[in-house]
DNA sequence: CCCGAAATGATGGACGTCCATCATTTCGCA
DNA sequence: TGCGAAATGATGGACGTCCATCATTTCGGG
């Protein structure tokens, strides 16, 4: 009744332990019929390699490198926190994580960091890609050099990475549009103001495109105003939104795709309640959480950074061990948070990281 | 630079391996000052026990038992599928899962099953509690007998379990209410029809209460109609909803808290588009997914069964090993799904049993 | 100062796999 | 038939911890 070992398999297959081992670890030099008998025995006994014995024995360590944009607040700070929280846990699995940061939005800095990396320096790489041919080339070189590459949050194109882990930003934008439509049921006139961070960021462009797709749906398409560019700057955001709310008629909904939402919330707080539009924005932060609480914001779309980190690590492990990547591993479904369903204990959840301590 | 072993710790502390081992595993019989030196060395070297060597060595196996309501479709089927998917993964960690089912809504059957359990039969128990004093007593007995008890999906009260893993149903109901309010922005008259599964189920009562709380908020409270009871039966549901949609005026929103939503969707499909209310319902199933796709349903609130199973297992492991439960472990934030943000690969996600779903 | 108890040291066999080495058998083919 | 290559067997030392056992030292109290 106890768990079969490889010795049991060998005995059942009528071969020596050495042969069973050769089959199991694909060391070669085994006649086909022996191999078949071993595989059959494995199947029949339901043998599964004891990973504890295995990892204990081969004392290989894995070094994964994460290249994240710097930033001590907002989304990337949460991403980094989630990564650091995993670090301890991973140490037990002989996995080392090197965290390297680069100035946000600086594709050249990223490219330089990538070019400085030798394929033998790490067993896997996760990057928040910035759009730049040079960075893409550097990534492709590493990938060609045998380094598993995971694009995190922002995709880098199929040649430059093995897996993309992140949300479907088109879908996120569409979901925002869907929520906004919901708030305009019953034939209410709609004037929707999209607010971009930087128009060059592909994820923001995708979100905008998704928004427009859904707003244009029949019947009763809603009007999308030209997108503002807040450049992720709270002050600029505040002024832009202030001005927008003074327009006549004022927008009936705002969708902010980027950062700097502190300024947005400030402008909303100033506005008379009856002029306040329905508001959808991205990323659950202390500010956005508070804004939900105050009824200034209706919905927050969140990328679930902890989940993204977990998925990236799972992907790196699979890739490094040459296993197949489970379908849908990288596809993160964005979470929607309203006033009454924020994550129970934000810091605790993030800190706890993986559940299987 | 390599990972320190307990031998290193012993050497650094100036004691023998045996003493370090006694401290690490709290075997007793160690002078206080030795203990302090060992702990200090552990801290200084950053020693962490190699869990692989440890689990390999102590060949303890853990047997956890899950008591779930039977049912080959709907939520409990997903819950079961998620559990079975984890089973393989857990086998590698020497954890056995015994799955036992009882007729749904049959508290007596559950109680009987619980009474038949001896504390030494299992190292942990997860139960979808049914409300019954007898079941609660049986659980309390097991808990007193030293068996870690996790209440899953439905709570059993503090005396009967160690942790509750599940969603905050009041919050789920409030969120539904919040979404419904969103769809009545701009002073639209609201007539909201709540549909219960069984009024005796506490989770449904909680959801209803949450809904009512939010609908009653000022300004512009919405009218909540008396709740219908569909008893989780699709046929009954269809007839009830059909009748409700013929009322004049028809309800502007439906909130279905229980199962049997297939019937609801059928009734909606028959209705003229302009009479269709805004619809919120629970649990992502093939049916509800399809209904989202067809624009018959606006929002689906999901309990994330895979996440609940993962959390329950994490809790059981922590409890069985006498560790503290991370704060917020059991609190599952319900997910909101609209047409454009369904989980990417439903089956794959469930099969992968991923943690941060 | 001596005795028993408490604390410590020393040691070795698991646990299951990985991996290298060397010896032996089997097989294909000239 | 014999030769070399391929396949197989046999074996043993890691890996780091757990746990039991036995020997030895230290310590406190009478």
Image (tube, coloured by chain):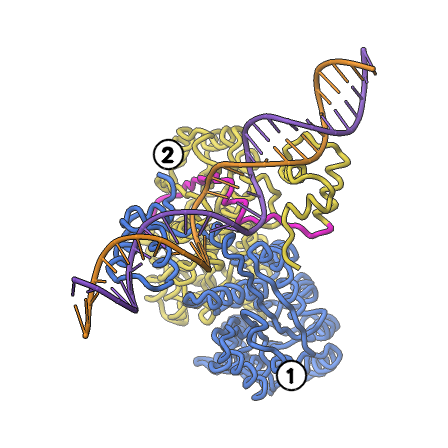
Chain colours: A yellow, B blue, C purple, D orange
Q: Residue A49: x percent and y percent?
A: 61, 47
Q: Secondary structure at mark 1?
A: helix
Tell me which residue sits at (49%, 47%) in the image: A313
Which chain's residue wears label 1?
A: B
A308 is within the stretch colored magenta: no
- The residue at which mark 2 appears reads as A109
The span from disc 1 to disc 2 (Cα, nearest Å) is 66 Å
Q: Quadrant of residue B237?
A: bottom right
Instruction: Describe residue C30's horizontal placement relative to residue B132 as left or right.
Output: right
Quarter of the image with the N terminus of chain B is top left
Q: Residues within 10 Å of mark 1 (few under 14, many from 20)?
A: some
Q: Chain of mark 2?
A: A
Front one among A310 and A102: A310
**Image coords of residue A323 (percent x, y):** 60, 42
Q: Residue at x 69, y 52 (%)?
A: A46
Determine the image quadrant of residue B357.
Answer: bottom right
Q: Nearer the viewer, mark 1 or mark 2?
A: 1
Residue A252 visible here:
no
- Seen at 48% across and 79% down, the residue is B214
Specify the segment rendered in magenta.
A44-72
Q: Which residue is mark 1?
A: B112
Residue B85 to residue B115: above or below: above
- Relative vertical location of residue A307 with respect to residue B260 in this rendering, above or below: above
The answer to which of B170 and A353 lies nearer the viewer is A353
The total number of labels drawn is: 2
- Residue B304 locus on image (x, y percent): 57, 65
Under circle 2, the secondary element is helix
* Residues tagged 1 and 2 counted as in contact (Cβ below 8 A): no
Is residue B136 something one can see in this rendering? yes
Residue A121, label in figure: none
Residue A58 magenta:
yes
């Amino acid at each position: 009744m106890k768990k079969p070992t490889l010795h049991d398999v060998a005995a059942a297959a009528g071969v020596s332990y050495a042969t069973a081992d050769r089959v199991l670890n694909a060391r070669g030099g085994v006649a086909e019929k022996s191999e078949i008998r071993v595989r059959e025995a494995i199947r029949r006994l339901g043998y599964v390699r004891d990973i504890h014995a295995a990892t204990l024995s081969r004392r290989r360590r894995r070094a994964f490198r994460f290249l994240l944009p710097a930033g001590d607040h907002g989304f990337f700070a949460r991403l980094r926190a989630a990564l650091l929280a995993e670090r301890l846990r991973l140490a037990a699995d002989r996995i080392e994580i090197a965290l390297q940061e680069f100035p946000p939005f600086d594709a050249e800095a990223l490219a330089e960091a990538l070019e400085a990396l030798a394929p033998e320096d790490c067993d896997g790489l996760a990057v928040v890609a910035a759009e730049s041919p040079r960075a893409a080339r550097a990534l492709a070189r590493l990938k060609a050099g045998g380094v598993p590459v995971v694009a995190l949050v922002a995709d880098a194109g199929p040649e430059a990475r093995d897996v993309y882990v992140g949300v479907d930003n088109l879908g996120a934008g569409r979901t925002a549009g869907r929520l906004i439509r919901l708030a305009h049921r019953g034939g209410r006139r709609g004037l929707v103001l999209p607010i971009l961070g930087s128009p060059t960021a592909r994820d923001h462009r995708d979100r905008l495109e998704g928004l427009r797709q859904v707003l244009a749906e029949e019947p009763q398409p809603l009007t999308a105003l030209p997108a503002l560019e807040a450049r992720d700057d709270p002050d600029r955001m505040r002024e832009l939104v202030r001005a927008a709310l003074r327009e006549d008629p004022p927008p009936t909904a705002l969708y902010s795709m980027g950062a700097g939402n502190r300024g947005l919330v400030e402008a909303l707080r100033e506005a008379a309640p009856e002029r306040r539009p329905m508001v959808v924005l991205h990323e659950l932060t202390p500010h956005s959480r508070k804004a939900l609480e105050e009824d200034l914001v209706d919905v927050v779309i969140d990328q679930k950074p902890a989940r993204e980190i977990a998925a990236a690590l799972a992907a790196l492990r699979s890739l490094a061990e040459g296993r197949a990547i489970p379908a849908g591993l990288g596809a993160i479904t964005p979470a929607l948070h309203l006033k009454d369903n924020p994550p129970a204990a934000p810091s605790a959840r993030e800190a706890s990281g993986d559940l299987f301590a």
